[in-house]
Image (tube, rainbow, N blue to C red):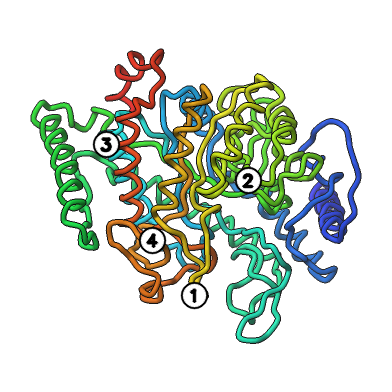
Amino acid sequence: REREKERVRKRKRVCEETIIMDKGTGGSGEGWSVDSWRSKSIKQQPPYGEEDLGTLTETLSKIETMPPVVHSGEIQRLKENIAKAGRGEHFILHGGDCAERFQDCSSTMVENKLRILLQMSLVLTWQGHVPVVRILRGAGQFAKPRSSDYETVDGKKVPSYRGDNVNGFCPTERRPDPARLLQAYYHSATTCNYIRALLGGGFASLQYPHEWDFDFVKSEDVLRDYNAILGELEHGIGFLRAAKVLDNNSGFDTVDISISHEGLVLAYEQALTRSVGGQHYNLGAHFLWIGDRTRQLDGAHVEYFRGLANPVGLKCGPSLPPEELALLVERLNPQREEGKLTLITRYGCAKVEAHLAAHIRAVQKTGVPVTWVCDAVHGNTFVTKGGLKTRSVDDIWSEIRLALEVHAANNSVLGGVHLEMTGENVTECVGGSAQLQAEELTRDYVTHCDPRLNYTQSLDIAFRLAKTLKQKQHLAPSTLSTSSKKRKRDH
């Protein structure tokens, strides 16, 4: 009982520091510990009040005692695969919601997210001839950074929506509530558990290919191409089935899918951090990343992330000077470990050529191994005449294509793509084979944050990317023979 009281007193002191730090204080510290980030300046934290201290203390203490969401062995396996992507042996498909909502934690929504991720990866593997590392942007993506503390809704000034683990989307629920952190844990664990059940039950098996929905494809030429590729794929699966390769012990009945989110609310992330074998793992996700707004070299997020054994990502935009990127790379990967650090570039298609090459050269000079991934969505957002945020499929594809070209020209490898997408046929982005126009967006515009590629548009990107990877022979020449031997096993 006394030990429990002491633990609660310690957590209360930590929560008091969290509230104080959010008001702008901060210092400097030496060495790393699970809470050394508290000595640094911090941004984008929930603006809890003094009256929330008790609830915050109780909530974080509860999360600390809960079982992990993922296992450290899974994290290590993902790190190894990310390292392979950095060498051009694998390709990362990282996609999912902009911001999850608790109400979307349903069997149908989870199944649709998995289905589109699996179908895209199948296209890339079959047509692009590359093993795919699948990372779901989900099962924990409940926090969002905001450019302003307040926004106007129906003519009224209200606190900005910061994600379901902070406050509610409804204007009457905008007061930050620490109890939501525990709800975030429960929803993450439930989603992850159902994903495991689906994969264990054969949801990803090649023996039971999912229905492909091309109903929204308007171009006859595109539809003909898609059906031809799908026909080849199904013919290949039929051959494997006839050859008795697809049996219950073949390894083709399941795949690995990792979960990820932006590590934003650091008190929550610390509560999910555990010591395993002398290393500290965040066991709330396999992969976490630092956003473009919280990547300060001397800031709390960089301090926390640099001590994790998880593979971590860093968003890199046009405002990041190459010399600062070099310092960040050395800070976040001091042991120069392959697979540890992924640089997720997000420029916008019009700025790729102006910034990417300089970033690549700056990192190459450090000698620190990294894996490069192209976030082709965040830099390509614009507002329609009707006032809706949207993105163009052509712009998204253009950024991916240019990134591939710039990497190739600079003796570098693009190891993957990062997309905001959904398995639903919503109407939030324009273009693609469905030829969606701006005036059609209101038909099913349901996002509570940024616009997402819908099911058809996501497949559009997958088909284009697979064709380009095949044409450009994306795999490094020195790894082709090795990778081709592994292709069947890696599915």
Instruction: Tell me the SS state at disc 4.
Output: helix
Q: Nearer the viewer, residue 87 or 119?
A: 87
Q: CA distance from mark 4 to mark 3?
A: 22 Å
Q: CA distance from mark 1 to mark 3?
A: 47 Å
Q: Nearer the viewer, mark 2 or mark 3?
A: 2
Disc 1 designates what residue? 385
Q: Tag 2 or tag 4, which sits nearer the N-term?
A: 4
Disc 3 designates what residue? 253
Disc 2 designates what residue? 317
- The quarter of the picture where the C terminus appears is top left
Q: Amino acid at mark 1?
A: Lys
Q: Which mark is residue 109?
A: 4
Q: Nearer the viewer, residue 281 or 296?
A: 296
Q: In the rendering, at what x and y percent does residue 260 appear?
A: 53, 45
Residue that lies at the very extreme toward the bottom in this rendered image = 155
Q: Nearer the viewer, mark 1 or mark 2?
A: 1
Q: Tag 4 or tag 1, which sits nearer the N-term?
A: 4
Q: Tag 2 or tag 1, which sits nearer the N-term?
A: 2
Instruction: Tell me the SS state at disc 1.
Output: loop
Whether tag 4 and tag 2 are in contact, CB under 8 A, the answer is no
Instruction: Tell me the SS state at disc 3.
Output: loop
Q: In the rendering, at what x and y percent does residue 289 appear?
A: 61, 43
Q: Amino acid at mark 4?
A: Met
